[in-house]
Amino acid sequence: MTSRQHLASWKHLKQLAVLNKNKHMNDLFAADDQRFSKFSIKLPSMLLDYSKNLIDQEVIDTLITLANQCELPQWRDSMFNGEKINKTEQRAVLHSALRGSVKTPLIVEGIDVGEQVQQQLNKMEIFVNKVRQGQWLGYSGKRITDVVNIGVGGSNLGPQMVTEALQNYSDDSINVHYVSNVDGTQIANVLKPLDPQKVLFIVSSKTFTTTETITNARTAINWLTSASFDDKAIAKHFVAVTAKPENATKMGIDSDNIFTMWDWVGGRFSLWSTIGLAIAISLGFDQFKALLSGAKAMDEHFKNAPLDKNMPVIMALLSVWNTTFLGAKSQAILPYDQTLHMLTAYLQQAEMESNGKSVTWHGDTIDYATVPTIWGQLGIDGQHAFYQYLHQSNNIVPADFIGSVQSVTPVKDHHQTLMANFFAQTQALMTGVNEEQVREDLKAKGRTEEYINMVAPHKVHKGNRPTNTLLLDRIDASTLGQLIALYEHKIFVQGIILGICSFDQWGVELGKGLAHKINLELDTDSISANHDCSTTNLLRYFKNIEKK
Ligand code: F6P
């Protein structure tokens, strides 16, 4: 595959980047009072304003040409048609099938995908209702009050992020907890207040080989069986979600208690599958279905809207523009809604595990910048932590601001105050304030010339910092489903434009393999001579500490 750099649109974008770097968004707004309507997209319950980017119509048109030259529409069809676009793992990429967005029947490797999905949804619904209605009982006949989801990465972040985001829609009949860390502190603290007679564990692992999850699951089994004095209790208290049921039964989990997922669902895109079991138990099955419907609505938009009116496409192209062409190194995700407090962590995995790569589909070295570092946290807390950097550092950090028109928990004037900050920040990041304005302001306040000379340079904000604003009507299961699917498709489009296979994650394997070997060594008294001297000495230090 020839580098993307040979495409005519790519070359054109490089020239446009040089030109646009010298422009200020203030001037672009002053010259065009239609800028908002040109550079925004409205969906039934969501608005994207991307006018506060360093773009003009020519940039957008050229980015769209680039998308076409990269054959984005064809790749999109291939994904929805179940072709094996995850080339290095030889798998289809069908998380959209989990929300009913593929043709029926869709046969992958002789299996009707839609039928399999429906079977598991039915099994989930029956189980969820039994647990929530108190018909699923623990070993001593008591109803389940607490569910502990044991999983990591995609088997944790998605379900936990959604459960927390939609907590206000829960009837609180069941408390759901999440354990992901192999650090025993987490599981010890989660289990401490719980009654083994009333706890249900969901062991969520696509592969059922992930060390963290297996270690935590074994600890949970020991905790239960030492309280119940009966291995049969496991069948009442453990269910598994996996694509490898044989591994779950080996651990002692009853085969009737296994919910299936499939190779064609990537871990970081799996919350729509049986991996979402904890979400459905926490919120009820209707809420889970509403989440799926929201995602389906975004799938339809992504499939059908023209590229220049297509939210995921535009967001992906802007990310490529800001990063690859304008040189941004990172991107902030800044939700202004408490319910979305885990969204940044979730999107870190989704985007960085998908596109944090440096070779093309064909294994050629990539000779251009790819995806930025994703970081951030709740915007309002960020304002009092790192926004100084966003406003005045030498690094330009494009940011997605995500807020809602209505609060799910209106408390007096809180939401208005929150959103005043939301709007003020994107405006300030764009407009900035120049030295002349600073000086005038200080003069008007009666400051001395000497003071003004000293402080003025420190108060200058160059502005011109790109932001996207996403405004949701309110956070509910449907809008959240749309929002997550929006980013999923954005990540897919980014991968296509950058020529990356977004659906494997070989980069996490090396460390996993070494950890396994080192773990075996830590069981013995000797340290292998094969390590570098840094690792050898760290291991020696650790073992000596341990012996004390
Ligand atoms: O971090 C690597 C990874 O493979 C992720 O892609 C995945 O979400 C996570 O580990 C958990 O994997 P599993 O569900 O197989 O336990």
Image: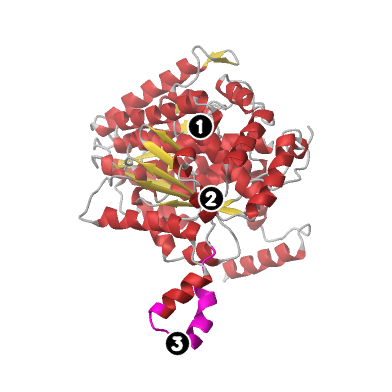
Between 497 and 115, the one nearer to me in the picture: 497
Of residues 276 and 227, which is closer to you in this image? 276
**Which quarter of the rendering shows the C terminus?**
bottom right
Does the magenta portion include 455? yes
Secondary structure type for disc 3: loop
* Disc number for residue 448: 3
The residue lying toward the viewer, choosing from 535 and 154, is: 154
Q: Which callout, 3 or 1, points to the residue nearer the camera?
A: 3
Q: Quadrant of the N terminus?
A: top right
- Front tag of 1 and 2: 2
Do the CB atoms of the residues marked 1 and 2 lie less than 8 Å apart? no
The amino acid marked with disc number 1 is Asn
Q: Secondary structure at mark 2?
A: helix
Q: Is mark 2 within 8 Å of ligand 1?
A: no
- In percent of the image, x 51 and y 66: which residue is there? 461
Q: Is residue 397 magenta?
A: no
Amino acid type of the residue that numbered disc 3 sits on in the rendered structure: Thr
At label 2, the amino acid type is Leu
Measured as percent of width and height from the top left, residue 299 is found at: 47, 27
Q: Is mark 1 within 8 Å of ligand 1?
A: no
Q: Quadrant of residue 484?
A: top left
Question: Residue 420: image x %, image y %?
Answer: 33, 56
Q: Which residue is mark 2?
A: 28
Q: Secondary structure at mark 1?
A: loop
Residue identifier under label 1: 310
Highlighted range, magenta = 444-462
